Amino acid sequence: MMFTKAITRKPCRALIDGITTAMYDDATPVYEKAVEEHDTYVATLKELGLEVEELDADERYPDSCFVEDPAVVMERCAIITNPARDSRNGEKDEILPVIKKFYSDDQIFFIEAPGTMEGGDVMRVGDHFYIGQSERTNAEAAKQFNDIVTKFGYTSSTVPVTEGLHLKDFVIYLENNNMLVSPVMNEQPAFKDFNRYVVEPDELYAINSLYINGTVIVPEGYPKTQKYIEELGYPVKLVDTSEFRKIDGSLTCLSLRF
Ligand code: CIR
């Protein structure tokens, strides 16, 4: 997988009201620090060769910096999801204009109610998509997604998400058959043929590391997972995501890559 572009959206001041389960940290994000961390994130994507389309902050949607959720993008089409939570649903209308810059109308599709989906539940491995069935993404949306992507030569299947928020908080694909998994996802038959590293319980947050063109961006502060990824042979770049973590956000959530 080679990426050339990314879409990001600056965090807004309303970020402090972002949805949180406090599963990683129960503090409130500090806006100014979040902006700094986001700037570093965007700079890191650029260092890795991506052209980044940077959208302005949108104060109406506290979680709108997590642009991965309202759309899923791939080479041959883009799908606007239908985010499950009321406070996030309108983000789909705000991501559409930028998706239209890169895709023609006949390449853009929509998950329709009663289907709900968020991009954090969609994990790509080659031309296959694993879709987490979570509190945010339901079976109806997975069916609609499958109907769309199969027309373009991709395949998909579903995986239950029985812990936390999104699929990619508990399993991530780093290309070359390598995967970081939680102990629960390690038992998932769908992933049995991958080279799996079971992340230590105190480093679960680091599962959501981000593969970009041969390098892996890892959240700062997770030395065991970082060392493992380095031992696999990947160059690593560290980015501090402490403020996003407070509202369940992590590295993949902060961009759409294609
Ligand atoms: C939410 O609960 O929707 C946000 N506070 C966090 C979204 C994180 N997104 C992702 O993992 N793709």
Image (tube, helix red, strand yellow):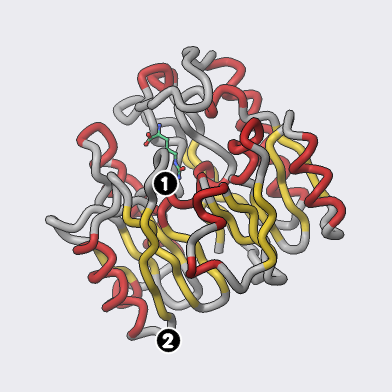
Q: Is residue 212 above or below residue 61?
A: below
Which quarter of the image is occupied by the C terminus? bottom right
Q: Is residue 20 above or below residue 114?
A: above
Image position, residue 50 (x, y; %)? 67, 56
Q: Is residue 4 above or below residue 56?
A: below
Q: Residue at x 87, y 54 (%)?
A: 231
The numbered disc on residue 111 is: none
Whether disc 2's CB lies below 8 Å from ligand 1 is answered no
Q: Residue at x 53, y 28 (%)?
A: 244
Q: Amino acid at mark 2?
A: Gly
Distance from Cα at disc 1 to Cα at disc 2: 25 Å
User: Which of these two is toward me, 32 or 164?
Assistant: 164
Image position, residue 243 (x, y; %)? 56, 22
Check whether the beta carbons of the residues at disc 1 and disc 2 lie within 8 A of each other. Answer: no
User: Closer to the N terminus: mark 1 or mark 2?
Assistant: 2
- How many discs mark residues in the rendered view? 2
Q: Disc 1 or disc 2, which is closer to the eye?
A: 1
Q: Amino acid at mark 1?
A: His
Image region (quadrant) for ligand 1: top left
Which quarter of the image is occupied by the N terminus? bottom right
Whether disc 1's CB lies below 8 Å from ligand 1 is answered yes
Residue lying farthest left? 114
Residue underneath mark 1: 166
Residue underneath mark 2: 153
Q: Quadrant of residue 177?
A: bottom right
Q: Residue at x 41, y 80 (%)?
A: 155
Q: Residues within 10 Å of mark 1 (few under 14, many from 20)?
A: many
Image position, residue 152 (x, y; %)? 39, 84
Q: Residues within 10 Å of mark 2 (few under 14, many from 20)?
A: few
Image position, residue 176 (x, y; %)? 72, 71
Q: Secondary structure at mark 2?
A: loop
Q: Secondary structure at mark 1?
A: loop
